[in-house]
Image: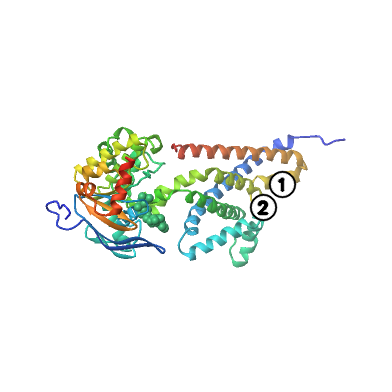
Amino acid sequence: MGYVLDFGVVYERLPELLLAALSTIGLAVAGMSLATLIGVLGVLTRTSKSSLLRIPTIAFVEVIRNTPFLVQIFFIFFALPQFGIRLNPTATAIIALAVNGGAYAIEIIRGGVESIGKGQIEAGLALGLHKAQVFRHIVLKPAFRAIYPSLTSQFIMLTLTTSVCTSIAAYELTSVAQRIESDTFRSFEVYFSITLIYLAISGLMMALFSAISKLLFSYPVR
Amino acid sequence: MPHIEPGSEQALIALEGVEKWYGTFHALKNINLSVHKGEKIVLCGPSGSGKSTLIRCINRLEDIQRGRIVVEGLTLDDSGKTVDAVRREVGMVFQSFNLFPHMTIIENCMLAPMRVRAMSKADARDIATKYLGKVRIGDQADKYPAQLSGGQQQRAAIARALCMEPKVMLFDEPTSALDPEMVKEVLDTMIGLARDGMTMICVTHEMGFARQVADRVIFMASGEVIEEAQPDEFFSTPRHDRTKAFLGEILAHH
Ligand SMILES: Nc1ncnc2c1ncn2[C@@H]1O[C@H](COP(=O)(O)OP(=O)(O)OP(=O)(O)O)[C@@H](O)[C@H]1O
Ligand SMILES: [Mg+2]
């Protein structure tokens, strides 16, 4: 006898999966937002004249980009408590995603900032704006526009990486799916279903990114 | 002797023994120059002679290694305060316009009044509207830079600088990046500005413009001021061989 598909059990527990999917989206959005913040601040320290700021930033980027996410999240969840820093799984997941996404964002956004012509910056300075104002008002938006496709595909990756947070039993789609599977032994049905849900989440993210792009980056360029 | 407007005893800009190096390259050699209120200076010379470097020192886009630059009684130094004060009084127009692509023309003009002069949005809009009208592109206010012709973009850049109501305007080859048919509209805007009494230092090879508005023409070569004269004299009886050679080349091209 072959395996008989039965999506009934999945259908019964769909509300649980959808709630977990919402949590996945929440983790992803929180991670991306913080990663963007880390990215922007990190570009400032990464390109700072002070080596006291620049070198730690380079070290941070290299450590994060050359180690597995799973190790990073275990480090925060299991190793930090040894030093008295104890975080719940959700907080750990968000921080790990922010730190990981942030390291990539620093390098991506830096590329964007470097693509901005010297003339733009000089025009701002000549008008009397300070360096920080030039960065904020003149450099940042065109820089984001230049690297938006790379940054958003990195963020789609980050969204899918939330599934690794299962490893610390964070509440998100994959961990809930795992629980349903162990309750029902309906492996195929469960993982097939969450595959579709992840696809839908990615699609949603892409739609969101494209809406943001239309809102912010629709100015014409030559 | 420079022509001095009544009521302006002190030079608006004074460069005294200015020396500038880029690493080991000596870019400006003993530059002495004073510009009085209302004066129009045209700066010319072969490529690489230091024209851009000179005017960029005046608003501290470049620093100097020796000598002194005084703008409006303020001696430029490393303190942020003097640099800020000087930049507020000195407007600059670049060869490549350098409009901000993500802002509309009027937003380009409003940015500095709001951020540097702490003007309200409404006041900034009023002043931007005034100067965009003055350079005759009031109807382009809500377009983005990429939607304008080169000549319009350069006039917008002039308006943007004027919105800070500077005491001096620096122009670095403002028409060199333009298609020939757009040069005139930008020069006309600059001539209008000169007529209104603006103090101007213009790096340009537009000799017609120099004849028409310059009080003095300064010729530079290899980082030095070689010759300085009123336009009639400069064009009719250049003294130095390098000036003659340069003029011969420029006039052959025009
Ligand atoms: N940032 C820099 N670093 C090193 N050398 C520079 C720098 N900027 C300019 N120079 C050199 O200084 C010299 C003067 O340059 P500058 O741009 O002032 O010339 P210019 O007279 O404006 O020439 P052009 O007509 O080509 O614009 C040139 O030889 C140039 O190569
Ligand atoms: Mg130049």
Q: Position of residue A67 (x, y in %)?
A: 64, 58
On screen, residue B10 versus residue B32, left or right, reads: left
Quick one: B146 or A134, which is closer to the camera?
B146
Question: Could you say whether the residue bearing mark 1 is in a helix, strand or loop?
Answer: helix
Report if residue B117 is visible in the image: no
Q: Which residue corresponds to the image point at 21% horizontal and 42% vertical from the top-left? A: B212
Question: Could you say whether the residue bearing mark 2 is in a helix, strand or loop?
Answer: loop
Chain hosting mark 2? A
Q: Which residue is mark 1?
A: A179
Q: Position of residue A2 (x, y in %)?
A: 85, 35
- The image quadrant that residue A79 belongs to is bottom right
Q: Which residue is mark 2?
A: A169
Quick one: B133 or A84, which is closer to the camera?
B133
Chain hosting mark 1? A
Q: Is residue A60 above or below residue B140?
A: below
Q: Which residue corresponds to the image point at 40% horizontal and 51% vertical from the top-left? A: A121
The numbered mark at residue B160 is none
What quarter of the picture does the N terminus of chain B occupy? bottom left
What quarter of the picture does the C terminus of chain B occupy? top left
On screen, residue B16 versus residue A122, left or right, reads: left
- Callout 2 amino acid: Ala
Other-residue count near label 1 (Cα within 10 Å), few / some / many at <14 / 14–19 / ≥20? few
Whole-angstrom CA distance, mark 1 to mark 2, is 10 Å
On screen, residue A31 versus residue A17, left or right, reads: left
Asked whether mark 1 lies closer than 8 Å to ligand 1, one says: no
Q: Is residue A160 above or below residue A81?
A: above
Q: Position of residue A48 (x, y in %)?
A: 46, 60
- Callout 1 amino acid: Arg
